[in-house]
Amino acid sequence: MTREERWKENRNYAYGKQDLETFKKYLMPENNLQSHLHPNDTRDQFVLVEKYCRGLGFDCGVGTNRFSQTVLSTDWYPHKDADLIWNCFPPTKEGEQQYFYPYPFREDRFDFVFASHVLEDFHPDHIQMMFDELLRMIKPGGYYVILGPCMDGVRYAKWDEVFTADSPEVIKGERQIGEKVGNPSHMYNWTLEFCHQLKEQSKYPTEIVQEDTFTHDRMTLDFILQKK
């Protein structure tokens, strides 16, 4: 069996089993009608984008800050907040070809996709494909809610910024020279200009409905699209 035939078989299994059984609770009618956040939720950045996160949702790269227990979550490694363990670009050995594995959901499946501080961790060769993969699963009229570290200016360290001998953290012995200032998993500078570039180069048409509305005392940049 070829890789393509095997993948087709796996996707058919995923549609029939995972989408309808494993994640059945996320498809219940009540999840299409209510706000997913508790009225007293204190995560102000999530509250500020909540109006775009209604209906059936997909939380990509959930990490330790899950949007809601009523939203399907995924991550590339197992932990208590990840419903689906999935890696679209699994690690390869040296010399092996890198394959892309789409999520096991049909097109136009979700009312919204929530991606908080995750897209900037993908390799530059993969980011456009990943950006489009999440758009693929959103219904026309649905929302793509993206939050990321603003590296345009002084709100967050650029991806390749490192501590130097003059850095206060190095002088105090808290950090080492050459150690990254920001998150070591970041692969490039996440900026509003880069968000626009991903949107323009996407094969799925979208409209910007919200961008860069958070006050600049926050490190996060918001970028929200509506799929046409």
Image (cartoon, grey):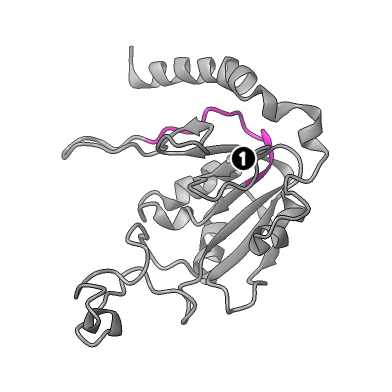
| 33 shown above or below 28 | below
The outermost residue toward the left is: 94
Is 44 situated left or right of 6 in this image? right
Image quadrant in which the N terminus is located: top left
Rendered location of residue 194, percent (x, y): 49, 66
Residue at image coords 42%, 37%: 88
| Viewer-side residue, 119 vs 124 | 119
Rendered location of residue 72, percent (x, y): 61, 36
Residue 29's quadrant in the figure? top right
Can residue 75 be seen here? The reply is yes
Which kind of residue does numbered mark 1 sit on?
Answer: Phe
Residue at image coords 29%, 85%: 168
Residue 80 belongs to the span the image colors magenta: no
Residue that carries the numbered disc 1 in the rendered image: 58
Is 63 situated left or right of 221 in this image? left
Residue at image coords 53%, 20%: 14
Residue 42's quadrant in the figure? bottom right
Is 29 situated left or right of 176 in this image? right
Residue 110 belongs to the span the image colors magenta: yes
